[in-house]
Structures are given as C-alpha cells and as structure tokens.
Amino acid sequence: MDAQAIIARRVAQELRPGNLVNLGIGIPTLVANYVPKEMSVFFQSENGLIGTGPIPEQGMSHPLLTDAGGRPISALPGAATFDSAMSFGLIRGGHVDVTVLGGLQVDADGHLANWMIPGKMVPGMGGAMDLVTGAKRVIIAMQHAAKGKSKIVAKCNLPLTSSRSVDLVVTDMAVIAFPGGKATLLETAPGVGVAEVLAVTEAELTVPDNVPQMKL
Amino acid sequence: MDAQAIIARRVAQELRPGNLVNLGIGIPTLVANYVPKEMSVFFQSENGLIGTGPIPEQGMSHPLLTDAGGRPISALPGAATFDSAMSFGLIRGGHVDVTVLGGLQVDADGHLANWMIPGKMVPGMGGAMDLVTGAKRVIIAMQHAAKGKSKIVAKCNLPLTSSRSVDLVVTDMAVIAFPGGKATLLETAPGVGVAEVLAVTEAELTVPDNVPQMKL
Amino acid sequence: MKPVSAEDAVALIPDGATIMVGGFMGVGTPERLLDELVRQKKSGLSLISNDAATPGKGVGKLFEGAQVSRMIGTHIGLNPKAQQQMLGNQISVDLIPQGTFVERIRAGGCGLGGILTPTGVGTLVEEGKRKIEVDGKPYLLETPLRADFALVHAFLADYVGNLSYALTARNFNPLMAMAADTVIVTAEHIVPIGVIAPDHVVTPGPLVDYLVSNG
Amino acid sequence: MKPVSAEDAVALIPDGATIMVGGFMGVGTPERLLDELVRQKKSGLSLISNDAATPGKGVGKLFEGAQVSRMIGTHIGLNPKAQQQMLGNQISVDLIPQGTFVERIRAGGCGLGGILTPTGVGTLVEEGKRKIEVDGKPYLLETPLRADFALVHAFLADYVGNLSYALTARNFNPLMAMAADTVIVTAEHIVPIGVIAPDHVVTPGPLVDYLVSNG
C-alpha cells in the first residue's frame, strides 16, 4: 500500500454513519474512496453542495456541478445545494462533523499551519481557516515528513491556520492525537515501530504503554 | 371621503413603478387599494413574501399564506417567498423603497414613536424598528390628532422607534416633510386651511408661501 | 436523522428546557409537537419564538397551562393570555426587534459571535448593550441565540431529512434548524428521496436530528 | 428591472469601479459580461470575487489585459497571471477567509455594520482588526463589503427579474445581488412569470436592476 492509501484508508475509519464530512484537496479527497459502501456519509463541497458523488462518467458531467477546485463531480440521491453563506454557516456553526485537511506542519499542542509559506507565493486560505475553526472534528491527513523534515514539529514556524488545535493527525507512519493538549502516539503504520516514528518526529510525543498498529 | 381614505389615497401617490413597498397594519394597509392598477408595485409582507395580493375569495385561501398579522392573503404572479433573515435583510439593507407605517407621535425633527406607551401593555415592536431604520423612504400615515391632542408634537415623549427621522407624514389634514430637519407643511387636505392645520399642530411648522391642497 | 413519534420526540425535552419554535402568528408551527408539549405538561420552558400567536394556536397553546417561564420574541400583542402572564410577572419577556431576533438566531446557528445592527440605536433597545462604531456610524452588538431544542415545521421532508417549506410558513424555521443542539421536525408530507430537487432543499438533512413520522 | 444588452450593461460601468462578480472557480460567473468588460477595455477595476478563476475563464479573463488594480478574494492559486500581477505589485490583493468573505458581503447587503467571527483569531488574519469578546470568547470584527456593481449569473430569470440558480453555480451570486448599488444579471434562460414558483425564487425581482437579454 502506498503512503497516500495508508493515510486515506485509516482516516476513513474515523467517519461514522450520518456524518457530514468536508474533505480538502489532495490526500483528503482520497478518503471518500475508502468509506464502506453500506455506510451513509454526507460529503460537503464548500462551493455549495451536500451529497458530493464521484466523478461523472464521460459525457455525463454538468458545467454547473463542480467541486471546490472547479472539477466536475456528480451528486448523490438526496443531495442539497445552497449558497456560500449557508455553506460556511454549516462549517463555522459546527454542523460539519468531520473535516479532513492536508497540513504543512502540526505542532506538539495540535496547532496547524497549512495555508502559507512566507516568501513563497501565497494562494490564499480559501475555506481552510473556517473549516479548522468551526468543524466539530478536525483530522489532518499528511505525509509524516517532507524532504526528510518532520511535519510534526515542536512549534509551528509557519503561520497558523487557526488558534484551535486539531483533533487527530494521520500520516503514513502514525496516528497522533492531542489529549490534554499533548501530542500522543496512538497507532503506528503496519510494519513501522514506535522507535522509528520517534526518530523522524520533531515534536515530543507521549507514548502510551501499548501502541497498536493501524488495522487497514 | 373619510379620514382614512384621504390618508391612504394621498400616500398611494408617493409610490413609483417598480417600488418595493412594505405596508404596516391599520391605515397603511389601505394604501394598496389606491395604487393604480396599471402601476406595478411590489408589496412585501415581512413574514416572508414579495407579491402580496388581495384577500383571496371564499374557499381560496391557504393556511400557509398569510400576512404579518396571520390573516389569509393571496400572492400575485411573480411572487417570491423567503425566510425571515432574507425578509429583514431586504428591510434593514435598504432594499425596501418605501415603508408606510402608523404613528403615535412624530416630532418637529421627524422622529417617530410608534411602538410603546409606557404604563400600558407593551405588545412588542415586531418589525417596526427595522423598517424605520432600514427602508429607503419612511412615510407615516396617521390621524393628525387623537382625542383632541396633536400627534405632530414638538418633541416625542413616547419612546422612539428609531434615531432615524421619517421622510413624510400624511394625515387627514396635512402632508408634512422634514427638509433640513425642520417640519414643513407641504399640503393641506381638501377644504382644510393652513391656519386650521397650525391650530391643531403642536410642533412648529415651517409654512412655505404656497401650500397647495392635496389632489386626491 | 432518526424517525420518531411526536410523543417520543417531545419526551426528550426536559422541564426547564430552552426551545425555539418556528412559525409566525402560528403559521409554520409544528402543531403536533405543541399539542404533545401540552399533553406531557412540560413546564418552566424558555420559549424563543417570534410571537405568542393566539390562544389555542401554535405556541399560544403553551400559555394556557402556564408552561412558559421566559419568552424571547418580537411581539405578543395578539395573545391576551401571554400578556396577562407578562403583566403578572409570571413570565419574563424579552421583546426585541424582529430583524435583530432573526439575526441573533442566525448567528447562533452559523457560529458567529454576534452581529452589528443599526436597529435600536437611540432607542430603549440599546440599554445594556455595547455600542460599536464602524466607519463613524453607531451599531448595537447583538449576541447569538441558541436553544436546547428547535421545533421546526416543514412542508416536505424526504427520507434523509432534507426539508423544503411552503409560502409564508418558511419564516424562522430554516434559521432555527441551525441554532439548537437537537432539531425536531414535523412535515406536512414525508416523501421519497429526490422528490425535493437538490436546488429546492432549504434545510439539508444533516441538520435534522429527529423527523416525526406522519402516523 | 430593465432589460438591457450586455454591451449597454457594461457601458454603465466606469473605469475604476468596484465590481462584485459571482462564481466559484468560474462556475456561476456571468461570462458574457466579462467578455464585454474585456472588449470595452474597462480598467483600474476593484474586483470582489472569491477567486481569480483560471486564465480565460470567468474573472480570470480580466487579468490577461491587466484590467484589475485591486482584488478582494479568498484564493488566487489557480491563476498564474493573477499571481504574477500580485507578486509584481501591479495589483493589491486582500486574501481573506472564505466564510468571512461571504459574511462581509452579506453584511453589506443586509444593512449590518459587521459580524463577529472566530475565524482568523490567533492568526495573521487578525492584524489590524478589532478583537471583541462575547461570553469570554474572542472574535474578529469583520466589516461590510459593498460594490458599485454586482455581476450576477442565474440559471432562470423571469420577466420581473426573479432569479433561481442551479447546483454549485449559486455560490456567491444571491449574496452579491444584495450588496451593490447596481445589480446586473445574466441568466441561462429567461422565462415567463410563474415558471419559477414563489418558493423556488432565490433572488426576488426587486433586487435586480438590469437583466441582460439573451440575444
């Protein structure tokens, strides 16, 4: 299983029947592929849709039905569309049960940086700040390290996305939560040992006596 | 013509084609009866409708289509319904061109009191404060005097409805505006002289050289 | 969304709960839930509703058995029972401008800390409120309203809880459906998925906790 | 509402005007008005739009001839032209969170002096903004956004200007239709009165100043 599949598959296990879920672009988008068919989960697209379905078959897409990146999508039976004020009312108002987003850095107390690298092109935060601030549960799906550097850092040096801490980080190596505001290693990826995770993690991790491996 | 008909007929002359108009209860409601049939004016009912029509014929009313007093109404072709946030977004946002409301007192600088008499039962302000604060043009339709006392007062002693001054007052005796913040007599009712108006008006009125009579 | 009977839905509401009830002069009010609140003699309720309707209609029913201890609304002029109880200090009543009322509910449902409105500036309404200037103009800071339960009435509800409303019965219902911990809905018609087109859904299903079955 | 040609509608817009344009990544954008803005070489525009779309699509068209001098939006990442012009300081860009962006437009259209949002607290976004506590929680005061012109794209428009929208092309359009001095609308279909049922009207006709005729 490649790194992205490990992450997406593990995150999918966090979703519960009936959840309203918003998936960010990149790895988070893949999560939808691993939700069991028999489980009804509502996916929101923040450009104004609940009930996002898979990419339509050739010739079946409609130019007025797209995801937040402008790509054609389909809508499932029971879908609902709405304006952007409603969309962000849902997000900021705590009606979105889970958001899954990518990250640049998450630090030891769960703060996230995922929208800006000073000195580089700043595309804009889009809906990320509202999602992290407002969703009931925030899950970060990202590689554990990039270019050999840990993305789980002691303290974010990139600009924060929100003053609110995230709830869970799922990487290709580990699952990390923040009980009591402390980064805690909950699981490791299949074939990855605790020591291996600690060796590539800049943040100090609390390690419980028993750290199971992800069941994928 | 009775007092109410004089007032309603004169107020109707203030409406312009295409205007979005909100009429309060009482005399203001009668204004709709005097709008020329060929003139298209949109009436808003603040419980969520643009396109308010007359009382439906016997057996044609619908329990889910009422005015703000809960009475059955009809809807004209081209009507639109919406929620209360939209309804008051229209009102407070200046999208209502004209509101016509009843008054208890209007004073020399155009301030209105129309929602509360201290010591008496206070029913609540409903939508009145938003209408007076937000509508583009506020017209007060009321009797000139009640129980022998002028309702055009020097200074309101009843609680104000808004810090915003009204634009026009139409009574059974006179039309009064507030150019430069000063109550000014624009017209008198048919058969009513300027002196007669001044005699029953507590507020000091500016009287131009020429005060025509209402053309009804 | 869970299907539920009116009886079981109302049984979830404890005495003393804060309830938001949709409707404008009883139009668009979930009457079956109010009948059940009366039958189950729920008491000490804090009621957030535009008005007190009329005796025997909508939320008006709650005043006959004095089930309301506090009310936040905009107008109670057409319910003599509610007026008597207010004048007799049996219920405390907060009367606020209607545009402010609905924006406070919207703020509660949309995660805002409040809104600034010009309505009420320079009147009795500004008492005790923070006044904030923006671009030299004064506004009142009005804070969010939320409830333990929202009792909502829709015209159509589909099997996943998507709701649409009819005519002037929409009013406060879609706003309240976002501003309570638990949302209970009655609908005139419960219909299969797809009967309400996506563009016509006003309240998306995930906002609805309980849909009262139609017998 | 007045019927108008795209050419005449855009002729109303002076150089240097502030325009709000509906759409999300070019979906739900009034393309004919943008084509006309390009053809008439309007310049120095202040653009309020969620994003910069992509080159050649939606508001993206305005960046090719450098017609924008200022932009307020939430994301410009997919339009290299807009990025270049931002990095080259040819345009000043205010990037703000999307939920804040739409609430500011709504506030502008609904007569609010602002809203309090938790979004952005403790981040770079709070710079220069008033922070206000409500019930012990900090919020940012975000002020209204309005424009001289709103360019709105609907799916259906009827003869009195009532509008409805399709699928994800609704997005910012109904909010912008309330927040500008002059509202210009294009619609995929112009239909007789009554084709859009009252309950399905999203933008009531009186909000529309000009409806662009369909050839």
Image (tube, coloured by chain):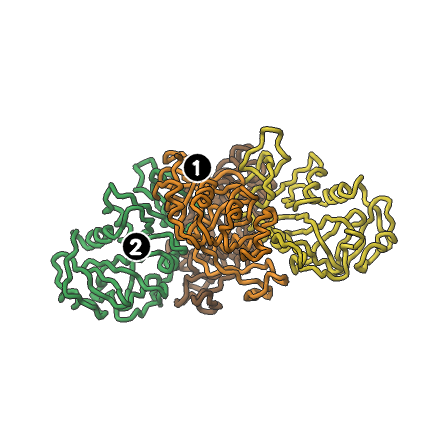
Chain colours: A yellow, B green, C brown, D orange
Q: Which residue is mark 1?
A: D156
Q: Label 1: state its secondary structure.
A: strand
- Mark nearer the viewer, 2 or 1: 1
Vertical relation: A17 (above or below) B1: above
- Looking at the picture, tell me which residue is in the foreground, C83 or A203: A203
Q: Chain of mark 1?
A: D
Q: Label 2: state its secondary structure.
A: strand
How packed mark 2 is, by other alpha carbons closer than 10 Å (few <14, some 14-19, many 20 or more), is many
Q: Position of residue C35 (x, y in %)?
A: 49, 45
Q: Residue at x 71, y 44 (%)?
A: A27
- Relative horizontal placement of residue B11, taking residue B160 as reference (left or right): left
The three-letter amino acid code for the residue at tag 2 is Val
Q: Residue at x 30, y 36 (%)?
A: B58
Q: Position of residue C10 (x, y in %)?
A: 56, 47
* Quadrant assignment for the C terminus of chain D: top left
Vertical relation: B80 (above or below) A179: above
Marks 2/1: CA distance? 32 Å
Q: Is residue B119 visible?
A: no
Instruction: Determine contact: label 2, label 1, CB under 8 Å.
Output: no
Q: Which residue is mark 2?
A: B100
Q: Residue at x 69, y 43 (%)?
A: A16
* Quadrant assignment for the N terminus of chain D: top left
- Relative horizontal placement of residue C95, taking residue A59 as reference (left or right): left
Q: Quadrant of residue D94?
A: bottom right
Vertical relation: C61 (above or below) B125: above
- Looking at the picture, tell me which residue is in the foreground, D176 or B173: D176
Label at residue C23:
none
The three-letter amino acid code for the residue at tag 1 is Leu
Vertical relation: B133 (above or below) C215: below
Q: Position of residue C203 (x, y in %)?
A: 53, 43
Q: Residue at x 60, y 39 (%)?
A: A71
